[in-house]
Amino acid sequence: MRIAICIPTRGEMKAEFVRSLGNMLLRPLPDAEIRLLIQSGHVVTNRNLLFRQAVNMGVSHFLWLDDDHSFPDWALERLLSLKLPVVTVNQAIRASPTAPNSRIPSEDGKGERVYTTQEMADERHVQQVATTGLSLCLIDMRILVKLAVQANKEGRELYPMFAHVPAADPSDDLSEDGFFFRRLREAGVNIFVDHWLSWETRHISDRALTMQDTIDDREAFELLHKREA
């Protein structure tokens, strides 16, 4: 098993991220060959370059890591054990009030936010979602077959894999990770979040945002965005 750990960065890795990465790499993972790839610059360009590098290396798995997160040393081992095509964490967005970034389909088309709770973490619950983030995301590279078939059906190239799609209302912009997850859905690739690992992951900001913060902020966040709508 060959795994590429890919880190898009703007050159300012958080200390807690470096510590988390080091601890994870020190944890024994039998029969695994790990390659570390780091790309600095614009996030969309970074993701496209890193993805193609990993594909060219012939890796079996691809782990995205954003350098403004901290996570337990067992993160990679846990994600691999789930044996899913795409599995990631539910991330607290860097805003006040905060909210989780993962969504499931809803009638209004905007998606209903998925809230990770302590109970879901204790139960080791894994949930299928429509869209989420790439902060700590493991991809089984066999999904490339489905992506290639879908691209051929649409009469377009496989790459770029990531793009930012602006909208008339900036709040409706499609981010590079949203673009990627939309392609996965169109190709019939299922996307999952692991609530256990989500609960143990931190999005580093002025606050160390956790899933508990999203629960505490839920009423304030939904009231704020209801007014904006």
Image (tube, rainbow, N blue to C red):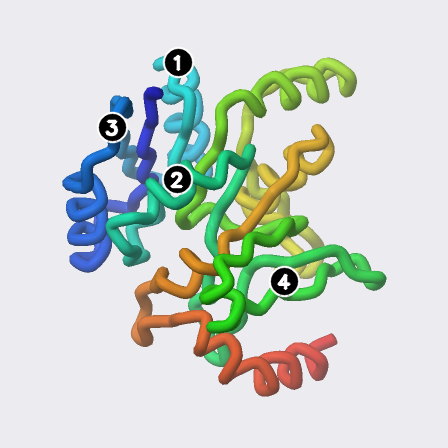
**Dot placed on the residue nearer the N-terminal end, 1 or 2:** 1
Question: Mark 2 — residue?
Answer: 64
* Residue located beneath label 3 in the image: 30
Check if mark 4's residue and mark 2's residue have beta carbons within 8 Å: no
Left or right: 145, with 14 as reference point: right
Secondary structure of the residue carrying tag 1 is loop
Q: Earlier in the sequence, mark 4 or mark 3?
A: 3
Q: Name the residue carrying label 4.
A: 171
The quadrant of the picture occupied by the C terminus is bottom right
Q: CA distance from mark 3 to mark 2?
A: 20 Å
Residue annotated with mark 1: 58
Q: Nearer the viewer, mark 4 or mark 3?
A: 3
Proximity of marks 1 and 2: CB atoms separated by less than 8 Å: no
Instruction: Give the amino acid at mark 1.
Output: Gly
Q: Position of residue 44 (x, y in %)?
A: 46, 38
Residue occupying the point 33% across, 21% down: 2
Q: Nearer the viewer, mark 1 or mark 3?
A: 3
Badge 3 amino acid: Pro
Disc 4/disc 3 C-alpha distance (Å)? 44 Å
Q: Amino acid at mark 2?
A: Trp
**Quarter where residue 37 is shown:** top left
Pointers 4 and 1 in contact (C-beta within 8 Å) = no
Q: How far apart are the two marked residues, 1 and 3, measured between alpha carbons? A: 19 Å
Q: Residue at x 47, y 64 (%)?
A: 121
Q: Is residue 211 above or below residue 96?
A: above
Name the residue at 22% across, 45% down: 24
Marked residue nearer the N-terminal end (3 or 2): 3
| Extreme-front residue of the structure | 123
- Residue 219 location (% of width, % of height): 61, 86
Secondary structure under tag 4 reads: helix
